[in-house]
Image (cartoon, rainbow, N blue to C red):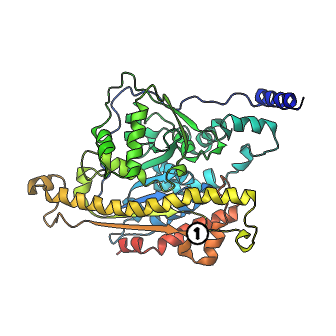
Amino acid sequence: MRHAMIASIGLMASACAGLPDTTPINHPLSFAPTPVVQDLGVDGDAIALAFSGGGARAASFSHGVLLQLREMKDASGRPLLDRVSLITAVSGGSITAAYFGQTGAEGLDSFRAVALDMDWNSQLHTSWMSPQNWDRLLQGGLNGPDKLAAWLDQHIFAGKRMRDMGAKPQIIINATDLYSGAPFAFAPPWFDAICSDLGSVRIADAVAASMSVPIAFRPVVVQSFPKNCPLPLPAWVDRTMVDRQSPMLLKETARSFRFFRDTDRMSHLHLTDGGVADNFGVSSFVTLNAAGAGPYAPLSARDAVKLRRLTFVIVNAERPVDGDWAREQAGPDGPELIATALSIAVNAPKRAAADAFEGFLDDWRDSLVKWRCGLTPNEAAALGAGPDWKCQSVEIVFDIISFADLGDARAARLGSAETAVSLPADLIDDLIAGGRAATAWNDAFIALTK
C-alpha cells in the first residue's frame, strides 16, 4: 500500500509538471563558419578579462569592474574600457559579459535596471515541499528553459543572437558538457566540432547554459550534426591526444571533440554551469590558442604585431570561508557539509587552473616573441609594425581581482552574498562599488593609465 501511494503521488506530480522542454537550441551549419581568430584592433596595450561565476554576486562585481574601466583613462585620454579585447565568462559573470558584448559601453548604464534589480527568485521553482518539484528534479532539474533562457531573452537580451555581438571585445561564454566533463564554450572551435551555426544561437540560451547550476536548472540541450559535415576535425585535436606534454584540460577538450563526431557515442550535448569544469573560464583561451592558425592565437597576426602589453585580469567573485561549525567538536551538519563540499569542489580546481594559466601565458608570450622575431621587416611592416618596432617588446601582465583586495570587513560583507540569481538592492550597491574600488586600486590597471 505504501509503495502504491508513493507511485500515485509520483504519477500525479508527473501529470502536473509535464514533460521538460529538451528542444536543442542550435541548428546545423549551412554556410561558412565564424573564423576562429578575429582581428580585434589591438594597438599597443590590450586587456583581457575573465569573469568568474557566482550568480548575481559575480554579475554585480564584474559590472563594477567595467564601470570603473570606463572611467579610467590611458595616457592619451582613451578609456581603459576601449582596450578590452576579450572577455571570457562563466555563469553569473556571463550575464555581464554578454550584455556588454551586445550593447557596448553605452549599455552599461542600463544593465542594473534590466538585470540586477529584477526579482528572478520569484520566477523560479525552489520549494522542496512541492510534489511537482520532486518530479522536476527527477527529470533533470527544478527549472527548465521557461524559467531561465526565456526570461533572459525577454528581459535582458531581447531576442538577439550570437551574431549580434559586437566585433570587439570578443566574448566567450563558457559552459560544461556533462557527458565528457570538459569545458564547452560558445565560440567557433566548439561549434565547428559539432558542425553547427554559432551565429544563430540566442545569446539568452548561451548564457542560460553557462548558468545552469545542476539540480536548480535542467541542462541546456545542444545537438551535434556530424553526418555530412563539411568540416573535418582540425589537426590539433589528434595532435593533442598523442602529445604527452599537452595540458590535461586541452586533452579533455580534444577528447570531447572526438565524441561530438561519434554518432555511436553521442548525438546531443547536455550543457550545465561552466563553473563545474572551470569557474574562471580561462581554459577556453588555451583551446582558442590551439585552434588558431598561429602561435599568436587567439589574436590575429595583425593584433600580435601591434601588441605591446597584454594585461589579463581574472575577476574573482568567490565567497570567503564562513560558518560557525569549525568552532564545534561536532563539525558541520548535513546541509553545511554539502554546501562546504560543493564549494571546495568548485573553488579548489579553479585555483589550480589559475596557477596553470599563469604558466601558460608565459609560454604563450615566448611563442609570440619567437613568431614575431621570425618575420621579415617587410612582413612586419605589412602587419602594422612601425619604424621603432622591436620583436621582443611584448609584456604579459597577469593578476586576479577579488573581495580580499578590499580589506577584511568589506570582503566579509561582499562574501556574505549568496550564490543566487537575485540579491537585495543594498548588497548590489556594495558589490558594484567593490568592483569599482578593486579596479581603481589594482596596480596592473593603474600602470595602463601612465
What residue does disc 1 label?
A: 433
Q: x%, y% of residue 64?
A: 54, 64
Horizontal side, residue 325 vs residue 263: left or right: right
Q: Residue at x 73, y 64 (%)?
A: 332
Of 142 and 162, which appears nearest the observer?
142
**Mark 1: secondary structure:** helix
Q: x%, y% of residue 374?
A: 13, 56
Residue that sits furthest to the right in the current view? 1
Q: x%, y% of residue 9?
A: 84, 31
Of 311 and 389, which appears nearest the observer?
311
Q: Say few, some or many: other residues with alpha carbon within 10 Å of mark 1 (under 14 / 14 to 19 / 20 or more).
A: some
Q: Which residue is drawn at 35% across and 37% down?
A: 34
Q: Is residue 197 visible?
A: no
Q: x%, y% of residue 298?
A: 32, 50
**In the picture, residue 444 is in which quadrant?**
bottom left
Q: Kindly identify the amino acid type of the residue bearing the numbered disc 1.
A: Ala
Horizontal side, residue 407 vs residue 294: left or right: right
Of 418 and 360, which appears nearest the observer?
360
Horizontal side, residue 348 vs residue 33: left or right: right
Horizontal side, residue 399 vs residue 239: left or right: right
Q: How many labels does the image show?
A: 1
Residue 260 to residue 175: above or below: above
| Quarter in which the C terminus is drawn | bottom left
| Quarter in which the N terminus is drawn | top right
Q: Is residue 274 visible?
A: yes
Q: Residue at x 69, y 59 (%)?
A: 337
Of 302 and 145, which appears nearest the observer?
145
